[in-house]
Amino acid sequence: MPALAVLLPERRRFAGQPLGEAFGNALARADALPDAEPGERAQLLRCFDLLPRGWPMAAITRQRDAGDAVLHQWLRADPAHVRPDMTGARVLAIGELGLSQAEADALVAPLRPLFGDTGFQVSAPTPSRWYVALPIEARVPAFSPPEAVLGDDLFSHLPDGPEGRRWRALLNEAQVLLHNHPVNAARVAAGRPPVNSLCFWGAGRLPDHVRTPFAAVASEDAELLSLAALAGIGANGDGPQLLDLRRARDWAAVASRLQPALAGLGSEAMRLDFADGAGFLLRAGQRWRFWRRPMARLA
């Protein structure tokens, strides 16, 4: 178990950026790990073990946001901004649209009777994370995760079949209500993106157990912090550390953040876990592999 595991975006995010001398040498001499499953979900599942198996992220984040996730099955219905084009509706933003809590509350208000007529409850405990409470036994079709939907046609990611048609109809009605909402009119007048759609994803019940080998986590990501909370870890703890740098775009900033850990490697290791499935294990003893040519770039 490495003393420090670092979650990083896909290597192509750093395409063309020089690694610098220290990390160019370290990565050339490191142990390249076998290719793992790509994607953020797979990346987090390498750090957390959920029982029963699954990925009910709506319930996981709801527990941290509101503390009532055990009462229902949950579905995220995050605010989204879409732009109609020739082929459908292009998703330009999900969740983080700069909403205030007052704006979120106002936008959700007309959605409550719409969802209520189907037996569901919609709420917005935070401006960027909205939820639909479902009966425990409800059958919910599979929805694509936000990272797959973002930048693509929204309707190509909606499920088919009888249950899928139900959710398509519900989304269409919600879009009409949001389009006509005065909050959105004010946002457009102010040059801000309107909330004109929803992104359904992450359905399921709260896991019975969430476990991790890490003793502490450093992150600003709501999903990761929610998993950590269920696993009983926070920002401080003695033991293996998990550092989340998946939002980084500048390799120089990553290298600066990791340089002290790299310089301080002793008998323990540091693991770099990239979202494309690539991984490297760095140890102090690898410096003797000096015959290896330095790595110039990740991609």
Image (cartoon, rainbow, N blue to C red):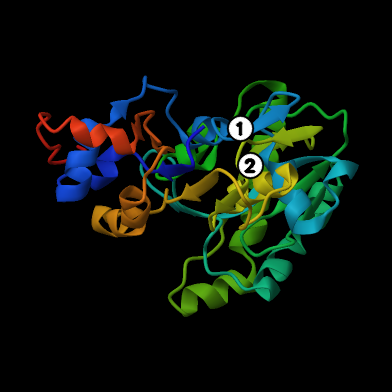
- Contact, mark 1 vs mark 2 (Cβ under 8 Å): yes
Q: Position of residue 293 (x, y in %)?
A: 9, 32
Q: CA distance from mark 1 to mark 2?
A: 6 Å
Q: Residue at x 79, y 26 (%)?
A: 139
**Mark 2 Cα shell of 10 Å, populated few (<14), some (14-19), many (≥20):** many
Q: Secondary structure at mark 1?
A: loop
Q: Secondary structure at mark 2?
A: strand
Is residue 19 visible in the rendered image? The answer is: no
Tell me the residue that label 1 is attached to: 143
Asked if residue 206 lies left or right of residue 148, the reply is right
Is residue 214 visible in the rendered image? The answer is: yes
Q: Residue at x 38, y 47 (%)?
A: 85
Task: Give residue 200's mark.
Answer: 2
Residue 57: image quadrant is top right
Q: Position of residue 131 (x, y in %)?
A: 73, 50
Asked if residue 287 lies left or right of residue 231, the reply is left
Asked if residue 25 lies left or right of residue 255, the reply is left
- Give the amino acid at mark 2: Phe
* Mark before the other along the chain sequence, 1 or 2: 1
**Mark 1 Cα shell of 10 Å, populated few (<14), some (14-19), many (≥20):** some
Q: Residue at x 19, y 37 (%)?
A: 299
Q: Residue at x 52, y 46 (%)?
A: 242
Task: Give residue 245's mark.
Answer: none
- Residue 224 drawn above or below residue 156: below
Asked if residue 248 lies left or right of residue 94, the reply is left
Residue 200: image quadrant is top right
Front residue of this view, candidates 38 and 252? 252
Front residue of this view, candidates 283 and 14? 283
Q: Position of residue 51 (x, y in %)?
A: 75, 26
Front residue of this view, candidates 171 and 96? 96
- Give the amino acid at mark 1: Phe
Front residue of this view, candidates 289 and 33? 289
